[in-house]
Amino acid sequence: LFFVIEMISNAARPLSLSIRLMANMFADHQVLSQVGGLVKWIVPVAPMVLGSLVCVVQTLVFCILSTVYISMAVAHHEHEHEEAHH
C-alpha cells in the first residue's frame, strides 16, 4: 500500500508542475491575443515582453522544483538504504 501511495506521490509532483507551467504560458498567450486583437501596433509590445519574462520565470521555477523533488526522492531512498544496512 505504501509503495502505491509513494509512486502516486512521486508521479503527481512533476505532473502538477507541468500543468502549472502549461496553464501559465497558455494564459499569457490568451492575454496577448486579446490585447493584440484590440490594438495592432505598439501596445502588444509590453505584454509580449512581460509574457517572455513569465515564460522564463515559469521555466526556472519548473526546473528548480523538479530538482528539489528529485533530490528529495534520492535522499529519501538513500536514507532508507542506510537504515537497511544498520
Image: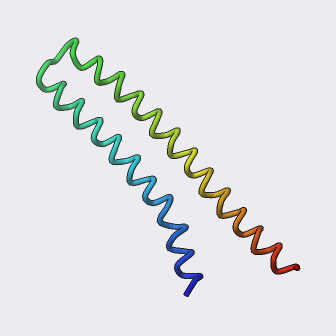
Q: Relative to 10, does residue 5 appear above or below in the rendering?
A: below
* Residue with the most extreme top position: 42
**Residue shown at the point (34%, 43%) measured from the top left:** 24
Location of residue 68 with respect to 28 vertically, above or below: below
* Residue found 29% across the figure and 18% down from its top: 46
Above or below — where is 51 with respect to 19? Answer: above
Q: Seen in the image, is 19 located left or right of residue 42?
A: right
Q: Residue extending furthest left?
A: 38
Quadrant the N terminus occupies? bottom right
User: Where residue 71 sits: x, y (%)?
Assistant: 67, 56
* Residue 44 drawn at (x, y percent): 24, 20
Furthest residue to the bottom? 1
Residue located at (52% from left, 38% from top) = 60
> From what the image shows, is residue 73 above or below residue 19?
below
Q: Position of residue 53 (x, y in %)?
A: 42, 28
Quadrant in the picture for residue 83: bottom right
Judged left or right of residue 70, residue 22 is left
Q: How many marks?
A: 0
Q: What is the image's colouring?
A: rainbow
Which quarter of the figure is the C terminus placed in? bottom right
The percent position of residue 33, horizontal first and vertical second, equals: 20, 31
Picture residue at 45% right of the left edge, 39% below the top = 58
